[in-house]
Image: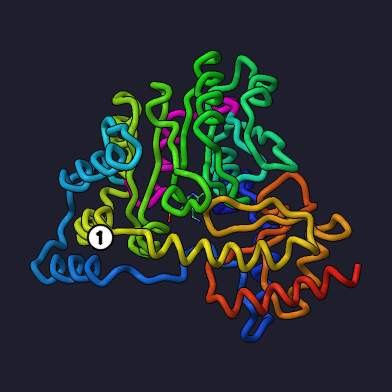
Amino acid sequence: MSFIADRMSNIDASGIRKVFALAAKMTDPINLSIGQPDYDVDEAVKEVACREINAGFNTYTQTWGIPELREASSAYYERRFGVPLQNVMVTCGVSGGLLLSFMATINPGDEVLCADPYFVIYKHLINLLGGVCKPIDTYPDFKLKSSDIDAVVTEKTKLLIVNSPSNPTGVCLDEGELRAIADVARKHNLLVITDEIYEQLQYDSPPCTIVGMYDNVILLNGFSKMAGMPGWRVGFAAGPEEIIQQMNTLQQYTFVCAPSFAQKAAVKALETDITEKNGNYRVKRDIVYEGIKDHFNVVKPGGAFYVFPEAPGGDGDAFVEKAIANNVLIIPGSVFSDRKTHFRISFAAPDDTLRKGVEVLNRIAGEY
Ligand code: PMP
């Protein structure tokens, strides 16, 4: 008898494991695979964290999170988007919020819609819970369209995941597109989970949120990207009281609370001016996009720190193997998609690393 629970067979991590196995053989790669920012936590935010640790704020907090951070998160949405948040709870990153919100809402057999390409965690967590993940193909422009959602809804469809700016494509939805998605969700009485973790990293157009466009929306956001603190595990969730209450009950028996000092520091992080970081990342986006656009079929990403080009020859897995053989680490699109035609570049890296990577990728493309 195996000690491993049957449900674990619902998680297939073979794609990403294969990449890690290949990467392990590389020495000093040009690494364009990283899913976290290359900037550090701001000094002022670190100071708050250190001060709180030294002052003994090392205890549990309320399961909901410290009131200052719950209030500051709501005030931040009001300032940035003109919509305050309802029923905010603090989570252990957006990953924590995803697990809690999925566990609180997905019954076995429930269908969950998301854009394909998708952030990997969605599909695997949905499967783990016995839900049915139904990715909606968004190639070639990677925009999740209300008409495509409308076409695939069945009586079993319960949830719709929205992720703008997107991992792995960097594509952003504008206000009109989000409003159309909210309308179709309303028409079919779907619960929307919006993952807005890259909302501070948007380069060409003002950021927007689906919060406030429809009542049945659970917002997830966090500090891993905006404040460069992925290891501190803080995020927030907000939405209908009935659901957030259940998520809080689950948190009580699982994560218990987000790290105490990091919650205090996160309040400070919400006050931080992001103009400079945003400008630096726009430059990185331009280095990669402008650098490869004449050699690859590629959509210009408006946000996050990813570019998702089509592989020359149409086989992303094969192209990634070639790139790795040339010391450039990128991720095959098949990790994020039912298709394997593309690959993901992360531009969360120093500018000269990006330039070197662009040069190698263009040279490989020239071999096709
Ligand atoms: N959502 C998306 C789209 C992401 O890219 C990530 C991190 N790679 C997360 C959620 C999880 O972030 P965290 O748990 O660190 O907040």
Colouring scheme, one of rainbow, by chain, secondary structure, one colour:
rainbow
Label 1 residue SS: helix
* Residue located 53% across and 27% down the image: 159
The span picked out in magenta is 91-111
Under 8 Å from ligand 1: the CB of mark 1?
no
Q: Residue furthest left?
A: 55
Report x, y in % for residue 82.
31, 34
| Other-residue count near label 1 (Cα within 10 Å), few / some / many at <14 / 14–19 / ≥20 | many
- Seen from the viewer's position, the closer of residues 221 and 301 is 301
Three-letter code, disc 1:
Ala
Above or below — where is 145 with respect to 221? above
* Residue located 48% across and 51% down the image: 202
Q: Is residue 298 left or right of residue 62?
A: right
Any magenta on residue 102? yes
Q: List the residue tagged with mark 1.
A: 262
Q: Is residue 85 left or right of residue 351?
A: left
Report x, y in % for residue 152.
68, 22
* Residue located 70% across and 65% down the image: 18
* Residue located 58% across and 32% down the image: 131
Above or below — where is 189 with respect to 89? above
